[in-house]
Image (cartoon, rainbow, N blue to C red):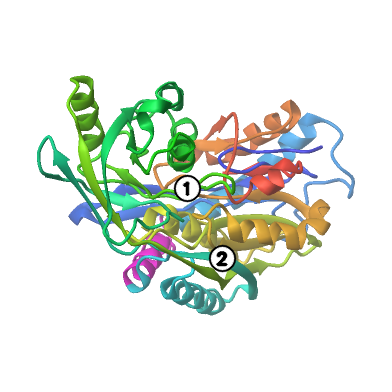
Amino acid sequence: MSTQSTCSEGHTCATPEILITCFAICGKEKREKMKYIFLVFFINLLPQYPGKSLRRDDSYPKTFEDIKNEIAGYSDIAKAIIDLAVHGKAQNRSYERLAVFADTIGPRLSGSKNLDAAIKYMFSALQEDRLENVHLEPVKVPHWERGEEFAMMLEPRNHSIAILGLGSSVATPPKGITAEVIVVASFDELHKRAQEAKGKIVVYNKPFISYGETVRYRSQGAVEAAKVGAVASLIRSIATFSINSPHTGWQNYQRDVPRIPTACISVEDAEMMSRMSFRGTKIVVHLKMGAKTYPDSPSFNTVAEIVGSKYPEQIVLVSGHLDSWDVGQGAMDDGGGAFISWEALSLIKDLGLRPKRTLRLVLWTAEEQGGIGAEQYYQLHKENISNFDIVMESDEGTFKPSGLGFTGSAKARDIVKEIMTLLQPINVTDVYDSADGTDIDYWMRDGVPVDT
């Protein structure tokens, strides 16, 4: 049987002894303190207590009723994990760990000294937590720096435009670019107006639909603008709203297309220029960007384990990415996911539990640049892909949990639904239709169950 789950990860269950407790609840306490409650998602968790095996023998259960009964037998262990995370000594622990980490290290851009410091910090912290097989796996990662950035509307009036250069963007000439603007709402509109776009700065004012749909304008906007002869592109931030706050992110050039400078602008400025354009007003913008791309830098994926007692070669992988963009602390993206994944191992260790399969934590590097660390990890380990029972990633924000994303067969889904009943005490029981994630897509494409 193969099972997949979707939050961000697909899930293959070779056996049904799956105990799921994967979580990040973020809420407010008195005095504005933030409270994180962490649930762990794990498969084939031990009988912790001697003589408490739920199987009559070592073969797989024959009926779904057998599977339900076996899952129900883990209710005491599930309760122990929940109690430790929510009420016990682990309450708020992951939040406090994350707060110290983010305050100490700060932004962690691929190729930066801060990312190096973050990896060294986590390597020591995982050793101090007495996890097993703590080690670093080498990776080559992109090294891009944004440099000076400046944009000013010159016509129809002077107005400073807040911008954030997109990852891998080229620089403008030293004196910058001054050009008329063309505002479009889609790639289709851009190509219909291709003759107008030549020699201009393309502004994309694409309202947010969903991340998957709208992010194409950030990742492909410069290429599509360059194809019609534009000299630069400015993309409305991929967000539902902003307070004069543009968002950054990675973008991709194509080998056979000229590389033009590209940056994100705020929702407000994109809307303003769209209104001006609709009225037929001429818009002129001066853009200056000093971005630089350096040779790839050495980095590492950070790994720790709790080795399985019965099937140590079989892997249940939990993960988050350690890198971030350079304009914030990366506490949400993806510090929270990385520290939730660490907490999963900490909770099991603190309870003296020993999973049957190896529980492996991987803190990816260079996710923001397109999952570079995860891809190199996959290439290194794919020859043993049959040993990976499930690969999980937390990278969708640390909010109050409501359930689990899952991708897999109908039978597998039924099993996951039963597992989720163990989380009824904290009302986290939903099972959603799909899972994806930049760092786990490589495994999912090969049929390994994933979960987010």
Name the quarter where the C terminus is drawn.
top right
Label whose residue precedes the other's in the sequence (2 or 1): 2
Is disc 2 surrounded by few (<14), some (14 to 19) or many (20+) residues within 10 Å?
Answer: many
Amino acid at pointer 1: Gln
Q: Indicate the position of residue 336 as horizontal and vertical percent values.
A: 43, 56
Q: Secondary structure at mark 2?
A: strand
243 on left or right of 40 = left
The kind of residue tagged 2 is Val
Q: Which residue is the site of mark 1?
A: 251
Residue 390: x, y in percent?
A: 70, 48
Q: Does the magenta-highlighted stretch encompass residue 335? A: no
Q: Main secondary structure of the magenta part?
A: helix
Gap between marks 2 and 1 measured at Cα: 15 Å
> In this rendering, does residue 356 appear at all?
no
Give the x, y percent position of residue 136.
Answer: 62, 74
Q: In the depicted view, which residue is nearer to us: 303 or 239?
A: 239
Relative vertical location of residue 105 with respect to residue 75 in this rendering, above or below: below
Residue at 43%, 41% (x, y): give it: 218
Residue placed under numbered mark 2 in the picture: 141
Q: Tell me where the magenta segment starts and ends, as one range.
A: 87-103
SS under mark 1: loop
Which residue appears at 50% of the width and 78% of the height? 120
Quadrant into which the N terminus falls = top right
